[in-house]
Amino acid sequence: MAWLHVESIVMSAWHGRQAATGMTPMTAARYVRVFQSFVRYATAHGVDSGVVSPALCLEFTNAALAGRVVPSPSTRRFRLTVVRSAFQVLREAGLASSDPTSELRVEWRQGRPAPCPLTPAEAWRIRVAGRTSPTDTLRPAVVTVALAGGSHQEISAVAIGDVDVDQARLRLGGLSGPERWRPLDAAAVATLRTRIVAQRLRWRRLHRAWDPLVVPLAMHRPVLEYPAGSVAPTVSMNLSRALQGAGVTRAGIRPRSVREFAANRTYALTGRVEDVAQLLGLASLDTAAGFLDDSWQGRWARRCAQLSSFDG
């Protein structure tokens, strides 16, 4: 069967699944781009769609990026996921008798990566410029919750009713750990107040009942309306876009860096790992200590101690 016909069948299936599985148009577009790369790779190696081997799939998964850059484990895993999904579509359509990716695995890194917290200046920039458009209130809200110590799970679950504007505080936790209230500075209160107004207008346009305990603060929809596997990637994507919008793109920076900054700033102010654990909602002091970076403390701790907020 010609690759052109295979591409058409697979892409149509992915686009048709968006409503049923929660796959967003952006994710579907990424699947399409990767599968088109696989088709070009197979064609260049003279492989017909009916004789794709596990070896070819593995070679494509590990193929270097532009400039001979070695792909990261996450890139390799995504490539394998896309090719596996494509062959699942072909098997369901009766166009393939087996899945050449069924026995393939991508080794994942062991252990947690070394912390790479934002600098004070970068934290200030992401608060001020970490939005994708002038009307974007989502990314600033996500950043604010992360800087308050919220995990990905907590960012996804926090609701409008968890914000106490009058007392300038935010409620986190209550999911897998104890509930805690985090203080907010004036800029954070203003950011969340703007987000609440935007959500109220959006809910009115959608003709949905306004319930502050249900309407999300840092997601487009209540967390229970998302596929379980898409919640953490959605939070990561929003933090990544905020970092990119603020121009914070140095090597090592990732979504977790925002929360790592909050942890390191707290330690710089108090010198207590217990306070870091309380900020992050962690029961383990060892886990809390894993967020701290000695080189960051040596360079930025004194500056943070001189500042009353996240100013740069």
Image (cartoon, grey):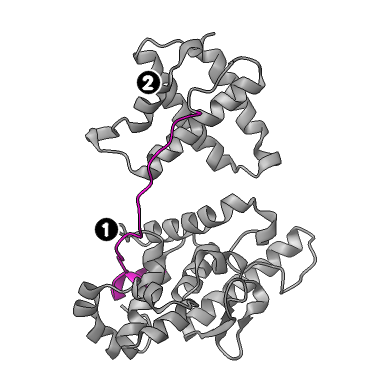
- In percent of the image, x 62 and y 76: which residue is there? 174
Q: As displayed, is residue 60 above or below residue 112?
A: above
The three-letter amino acid code for the residue at tag 1 is: Arg
Residue 151: percent from left, percent from top? 50, 68
Q: How many marks?
A: 2
Which residue was labeled with disc 1? 250
Q: Secondary structure at mark 1?
A: loop
Q: Residue at x 47, y 85 (%)?
A: 185
Report the amino acid beneath label 2.
Tyr
Residue topped by disc 2: 41
Find residue 157 and report its horizontal and vertical position in percent: 62, 67
For residue 35, say whether it is visible.
yes
In the visual, does 179 lie left or right of 149? right
Q: Position of residue 209 (x, y in %)?
A: 80, 66
In this view of the protein, which residue sits in the foreground, 291 or 231? 291
- Disc 2 to disc 1, C-alpha distance: 31 Å
Task: Please name the predominant secondary structure of the magenta segment in the image.
Answer: loop
Tell whether position 289 is magenta.
no
Location of the C terminus (image quadrant): bottom left
Residue 114 placed where, x, y %?
Answer: 29, 63
Mark 2 residue crowding within 10 angstroms, few (<14) / some (14–19) / many (20+)? some
Q: Which residues are magenta?
A: 102-126
Taking the spot 65% from the left edge, 53% from the top edge, the residue there is 226
In terms of secondary structure, where does tag 2 sit? Answer: helix
